[in-house]
């Protein structure tokens, strides 16, 4: 049975695969409005390190859900879902097509599948887990998570204390893995039919080179100065979600004296490559028949032509 909901394009892929450029070209061909699906672009003042489109690009193709909160404020998947649903409905009311673009896979999943009824945080339990983390180390807690919730442990990086602690907290409070809670989800109230396009690398080495090149380009554009401005504000700290973002964390630690410039660059590139690997892991779990995958290495004109052909076949 066909899905009667109006379509929305989900343009996904790992970092440095050209998603934004493709989205802008699609806006020239179709009546689309872009919604950013990026957990760093939501923050004001975090432009270079998030590869946020510049002013000229935004004038040509405005992006919704960028620059909507301060780096001192946390921004959750639940907040993203609420805001994205509002934007989707607004775009639809104008007779246009929502084009959701980004690499924050948790946001895409929260939007499409809904948010599960996870137990609220328990301050006492959280304090206990934090004490264990300080005594035993983060690696020990990640190993425990791998025992009780292998799926979450595979998805959560070993150096991500917030998500490791939250996954263990959910298990202790509910008696079941967070991954099981996610799979139950909630009633799907998505007012659109997702048409998924994924830019994927066939040559991992090429993607790694592009990541390295882009990191050096960001440094040339003033990335360190951008983070230094945030560092000097005085109200931000390294444990905020915004400051744990890939790249920002490594530059912040450099400014704090933990690494010299060369070490910071090496760590930033490695962290970005690891981030891309996690993005690819998420995408591999998507059903093949539910999306259109294509190689980001093809010429831009060829990619655009293939995507437009697929969208036409998908009744867009």
Image: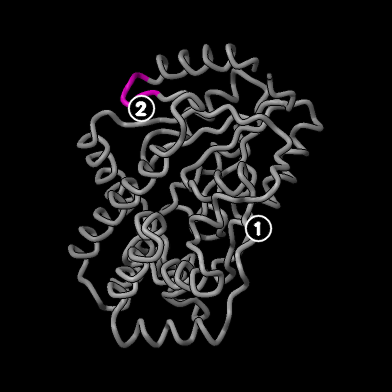
**Which residue appears at 42% of the width and 16% of the height?**
301
Q: Say which of 150 and 264 sits in front.
A: 150
* Residue at figure coordinates x 39%, y 23% from the top left: 294
Disc 2 to disc 1, C-alpha distance: 30 Å
* Residue 212 lies within the magenta run: no
Quarter placement of the C terminus: top right
Is residue 14 placed above or below 50 in the rendered structure? Answer: above
Label 2: which residue? 296
Sequence-earlier tag: 2 or 1: 1
**Residue 155 x %, y %:** 38, 54
| Image position of 250 with respect to 41: above or below | below
Left-right relation of 81 to 137: right
Name the residue that disc number 1 marks: 79
Identity of the residue furthest to the right in this view: 93
SS for tag 2?
Answer: loop
The segment highlighted magenta reads 294-299
Q: Main secondary structure of the magenta part?
A: loop
Q: Nearer the viewer, residue 115 or 273?
A: 115
Q: Residues within 10 Å of mark 1 (few under 14, many from 20)?
A: few
Residue at disc 1, secondary structure: helix
* Relative height, residue 115 to residue 27 (above, below): below
Q: Residues within 10 Å of mark 2 (few under 14, many from 20)?
A: many
For image coordinates 51% across by 55% down, the residue present is 180
Q: Nearer the viewer, residue 45 or 182?
A: 182
């Amino acid at each position: 049975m066909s899905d009667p909901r109006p379509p929305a394009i989900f343009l996904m892929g790992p970092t440095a695969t050209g998603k934004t450029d493709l989205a802008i070209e699609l806006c020239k061909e179709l009546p689309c409005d872009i919604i950013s699906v990026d957990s760093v672009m939501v923050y004001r003042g975090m432009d270079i390190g998030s590869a946020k489109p510049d002013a000229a690009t935004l004038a040509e193709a405005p992006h919704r859900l960028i620059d909507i909160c301060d780096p001192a404020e946390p921004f959750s998947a639940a907040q993203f879902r609420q805001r994205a649903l509002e934007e989707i409905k607004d775009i639809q009311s104008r007779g246009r097509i929502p084009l959701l673009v980004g690499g924050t896979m948790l946001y895409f999943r929260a939007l499409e599948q809904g948010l599960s009824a996870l137990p609220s945080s328990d301050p006492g339990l959280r304090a206990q887990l934090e004490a264990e983390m300080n005594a035993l180390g983060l690696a020990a807690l990640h190993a425990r998570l791998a025992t009780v919730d292998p799926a979450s442990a595979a998805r959560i990086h070993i150096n991500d204390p917030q998500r490791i602690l939250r996954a263990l907290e959910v298990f202790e409070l509910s008696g079941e893995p967070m991954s099981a809670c996610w799979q139950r989800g909630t009633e799907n109230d998505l007012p659109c039919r997702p048409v998924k396009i994924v830019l994927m690398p066939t040559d991992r080495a090429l993607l790694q080179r592009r990541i390295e090149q882009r990191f050096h380009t960001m440094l040339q554009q003033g990335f360190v100065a951008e983070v230094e401005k945030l560092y000097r504000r005085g109200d931000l700290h390294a444990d905020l979600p915004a400051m744990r973002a890939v790249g920002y964390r490594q530059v912040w630690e450099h400014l704090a004296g933990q690494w010299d410039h060369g070490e910071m660059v090496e760590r930033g590139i490695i962290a970005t490559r690891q981030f891309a690997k996690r993005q690819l892991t998420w995408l591999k779990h998507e059903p093949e028949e539910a999306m259109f995958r294509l190689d980001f290495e093809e010429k831009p004109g060829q990619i655009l032509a293939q995507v437009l052909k697929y969208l036409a076949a998908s009744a867009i």
